[in-house]
Amino acid sequence: MGQAQIGVYGLGTMGSALALNMAEHGFDVAVTNRETDWIAPFITEAGSLAARLHPHETLAGFVGGLRLPRVILFMIPSGAPMDAMLAEIMPHLSPGDIVIDGGNADFHDTRRRAAELAAMKLHFVGMGVSGGEAGARHGPSMMVGGSGQSWEHLRPILTAIAARYQGSACVAHLGPDGAGHFVKTVHNGIEYADMQVIAEIYSLLRTGAAMPPAEIAEILAEWNKGPLQSYLVEITADLLTYTDSDSGHPMVDVIKDAAGQKGTGRWTVIEALRLGQSASMIEAAVGARSWSSEKQTRQRAETVLGGALGAFDAKEEILAEAFLAARILCYAQGFRILVAASEEFRWALDFATIARIWRAGCIIRSALLDEIATAHQADLPEGQLILAPHFAKTLARCVPALRDVVGSAVRGGHPVPALSAGLAWYNTMRLGHGSANIIQAQRDLFGRHGFERLGQSGMHHGPWWK
Ligand code: 6PG
C-alpha cells in the first residue's frame, strides 16, 4: 500500500497548481498524467515541494501509491474523457475509494456517475473549483458535492488548501451527487453576467464618452474601493492599463471583439429554463458572446444598417449606482436558480454557505457576497434576494440610475443587453399586476387552454367560446 493521501490525475494548469497547493500544505500527493512526458518537468519545476510529490507513469503504479481509502482527483477535460477515464480506472479501485471530478462538468453527468459508482460502493464527488490558476495554486473556492462520508474524508485536505475569507475556508459540502457542479455552473453563469455588465459599462465610456482606456481604468480602480469591489472590477482596471508593444495602442483596443465560451454559462441558462426560471441577465451575457463571435456579419451590417452611436453623457456616480443595481439583480437571478434546483433535486442547499464560500478565491468574489450571505441567513421569501430589506433599499436607491443609464444608452443606439435585461426583470417583479392576463386570454381564444380568474378558483373560458 502506498503513502500518498491523495492522487492528482491531470497535470494541466489547474491540476498541477492544485497538486502544488496540497504539497505545500504538507500532504503527500501522487501525481500522473496521460502524456507521461509532462510529469518530469512538473516535478523539476516544483522545486522543494517535489519531496511531497510522488510521480507515477502507469495507472497501476499511481493507484498503488495511494493510502486506503484511495482519494483521486481528476483534473481532465469534462464529458467523454471523464467517462473513458472512469472505465479505465474502475478495475483498480476498491469499495470505499473516492473519485473526485474537479472539472467544469455538466451536473447531469455527475448525477449519473455518482449513481453508477455508488452501485460499486465507490464515492463519486463532483467538485467545482474556481479561481483560475492563481486560485488553484494559492487558495481556490471549492463547491463540493457527493456523499457525507466522502466529505468527512476530504474535509481536512480541502479545508487546508482553500482560499480564506477572514480566516474561514472557502469550501463546503453543498449536497449529494450533482450539487457541487450545479452550484459551480451557476457561479459561472453569474460570472458571465457580471463580466458582460462590466463590458457594457466600459463600452459606454469608451465609445459613448470617448474616454481612453487608462482613464476608465482609474474609474474602475476607484469603484473597486467601495461597494462595487470585486475581483472582476479589479482585473479589468488592471488590464486596461496595458499597452500593446507592437502597435503602441492600448492593449484592449487591439484585442478582437469576439468572445469564446466553453459552455457553463449556456448550461446555466438551459437549466434555469428547465426549472421554470429565467436568468435573463445570464442569458443576455451568453447571447452577447454568441453575437460577438459573428464579427463578419456585424461588420457587413454596419455598412447596411448604419453604426452611428449617440454621445453618452457618463456621470460616474450614476454609472456606479447603475452597476451596483445590475450586480445585485444578477446575483439575485443566480440565487433564484439555486433555490429552484435545490427544491427540484432535494439538495437542501444552504444559500448563506454558498455566498460565504464565494467571498474569496473564486472569480465572482465581491464585497456584495458578505451582504448576500447575511441576507440568506434571514428568512428570505422564495429565496428572492431582491426582497431582502437591505437589498430592496439599495435597489430603491440605485434603480433610478440604472433607468437613466439604460434609457440614454438605448436612445443613443448603444447595445446594453445585460443591463436592460436586469432592469426589465426588476420592472416586472415589482408589479403585483402584470400583462399575462392578455397571454392567458390569447391562449384560451386560439386553443381553448382556459385561464384562472382573479378571485375565483378553477379554470374558465372567455365569452369568445359562447
Ligand atoms: C472559474 C472559471 C473557470 C472557467 C473560465 C472560462 O471559476 O475559475 O469560471 O472555471 O473555466 O471562466 O469559462 P468560459 O470559457 O466559459 O468563459
Image (cartoon, grey):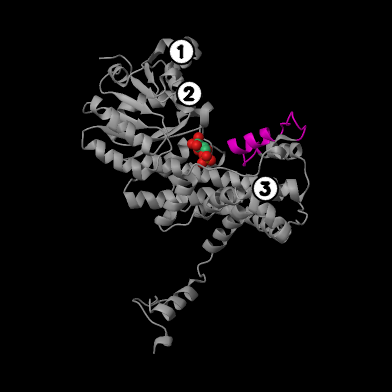
Counting the numbered discs, the total is: 3
In the picture, the disc for residue 49 is: 1
In the rendered view, does 436 fall on the left or right side of 291? left
**C-alpha span from label 1 to label 2:** 12 Å
Asked if residue 315 shows in the view, the reply is no
Q: Quadrant of residue 117?
A: top left
> Which structural element holds mark 1?
helix
Q: Could you tell me residue 205's position as x and y percent?
A: 73, 47
In the picture, the disc for residue 332 is: none
Name the residue that disc number 2 marks.
17
**C-alpha span from label 2 to label 3:** 33 Å
Which numbered disc, 2 or 3, marks the residue closer to the eye?
Answer: 2
Earlier along the polypeptide chain: callout 1 or callout 2? 2
> Which structural element holds mark 2?
helix
In the picture, the disc for residue 201 is: 3
Query: Circle 2: is it few (<14), some (14-19), or many (20+) Cα within 10 Å?
Result: many
In the rendered view, does 180 fall on the left or right side of 261? left
